[in-house]
Image (cartoon, rainbow, N blue to C red):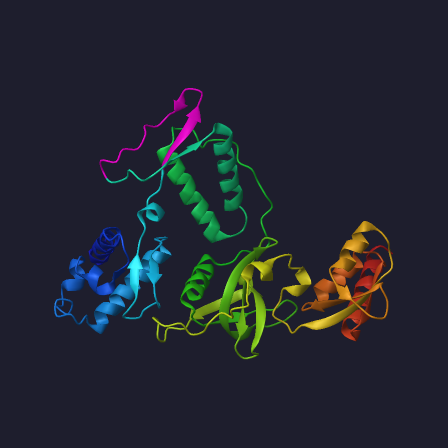
């Protein structure tokens, strides 16, 4: 450990001890009295903490949260009236053990050291194996951040449980063709947490060159082996989705780091936005309405038609909101003529081109 890192580490430890030592939410000034590094300039003792000291506290708080410490803010983030809390039950891990025919293999927790409120988390052998298999699959799913967290969890399990308890054959899944940069995902997560605007280069599907984007992040979601960023494109004043693996040169706005740049709309739900998203709906292009006629009566055709909305001209005609012409045209082609695009002309042309290329392959 370097000498430069030691003072910060000590400051973090002191701040965590101060937070855990208060049962009720504590203000910055109350916490600062228990952190020697915050007392160094004498401003706390005078009852007027300096601006540089407050910035140090804000940085410490953000970095500890990034490490997974669940520090809660009561009141408006960063204001003088805010107070902070760290619940012991959220911070400390429970004791782990394996349940066997002889009972619990690890001793019961004692309260001599203040851990009396912690429960014991016990696993049956088959439950533990399911956790191990799940962690290994997560590590292969294509998300480097989740993979790292899964590996950390496995190391914690291996430390607390008997030797060999987490051993077993490794499962395998097919990884996605492209993986996002872990640093990009981490930076986006930080920007989303602090509500900071980001700028980046983006290479759209079907585009020969990338273009700059200025975005207010609303959320990150994982679909089809890929991570996507949803947010407001500032230049277009419209909501867009961006595949994280296509983002390059990400920069987070550094102005007024302690203040949010924007608010996420109250009616926005990431869960609803990400639920059952189709490939043609995920992209950074403008939305257009596609009109499709369904001719078949098979279950697959009926299920596909149900994804669209009704059209007054015929029960067989359905309307879809589409962002990606190429993806939607390929999807329609999969129904072998039972789904035919009627408009717009660009979609009809793309569909016909796909038909001709397919015929040429099998001629």
Inspect the magenta stretch and tell me whether residue 241 lies in it: no
x, y percentage for residue 71? 33, 56
The answer to whether one can see residue 93 in this image is yes
The span shown in magenta is 95-113
Residue ranking furthest to the bottom: 235
x, y percentage for residue 108? 32, 30
Residue at 32% over, 44% down: 92
In the foreground, 173 or 308:
308
The answer to whether one can see residue 228 in this image is no
Is residue 289 shown left or right of residue 108?
right
Residue at 59% over, 43% down: 173
Inspect the magenta stretch and tell me whether residue 99 lies in it: yes
Q: How many marks?
A: 0
In the foreground, 299 or 328:
299
Residue at 43% over, 66% down: 191
x, y percentage for residue 28? 24, 64
């Amino acid at each position: 450990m370097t000498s430069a890192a030691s003072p910060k580490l000590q400051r973090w430890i002191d701040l965590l001890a101060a937070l855990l030592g208060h049962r009720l939410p504590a203000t910055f000034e109350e916490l600062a009295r228990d952190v020697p590094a915050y007392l160094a300039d004498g401003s706390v003792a005078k009852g007027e903490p300096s601006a540089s000291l407050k910035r140090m506290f804000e940085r410490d708080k953000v970095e500890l949260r990034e490490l997974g410490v669940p520090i809660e803010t009561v009141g408006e983030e960063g204001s003088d009236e805010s107070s902070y809390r760290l619940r012991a039950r959220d911070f400390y891990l429970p004791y782990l053990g394996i349940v066997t025919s002889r009972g619990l293999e690890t001793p019961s927790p004692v309260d001599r050291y203040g851990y009396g409120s912690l429960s014991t988390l016990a696993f049956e052998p088959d439950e533990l194996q399911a956790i191990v298999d799940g962690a290994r699959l997560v590590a292969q799913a294509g998300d480097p951040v989740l993979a790292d967290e899964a590996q950390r969890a496995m190391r914690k399990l291996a430390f607390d449980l008997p030797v060999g308890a987490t051993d077993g054959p490794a499962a395998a899944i097919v990884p996605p063709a492209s993986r996002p940069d872990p640093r990009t995902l981490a930076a986006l997560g930080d920007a989303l947490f602090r509500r900071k605007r980001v700028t980046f280069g983006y290479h759209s599907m079907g585009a020969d060159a990338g273009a700059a984007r200025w975005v207010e992040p609303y959320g990150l979601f994982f679909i089809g082996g890929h991570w996507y960023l949803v947010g407001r494109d500032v230049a277009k004043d419209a909501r867009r989705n961006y595949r994280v693996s296509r983002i390059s040169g990400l920069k987070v706005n550094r102005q007024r780091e302690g203040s949010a740049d924007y608010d996420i709309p109250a009616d926005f739900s990431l869960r609803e936005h990400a639920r059952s998203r189709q490939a043609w709906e995920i992209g950074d292009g403008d939305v257009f309405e596609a009109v499709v006629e369904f001719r078949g009566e098979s279950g697959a055709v009926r299920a596909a038609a149900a994804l669209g909305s009704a059209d007054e001209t015929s029960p067989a005609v359905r309307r879809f909101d589409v962002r990606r012409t190429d993806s939607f045209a390929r999807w329609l082609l999969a129904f072998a003529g039972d789904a035919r695009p009627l408009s717009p002309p660009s979609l009809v042309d793309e569909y016909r081109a796909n038909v001709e290329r397919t015929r040429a392959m099998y001629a």
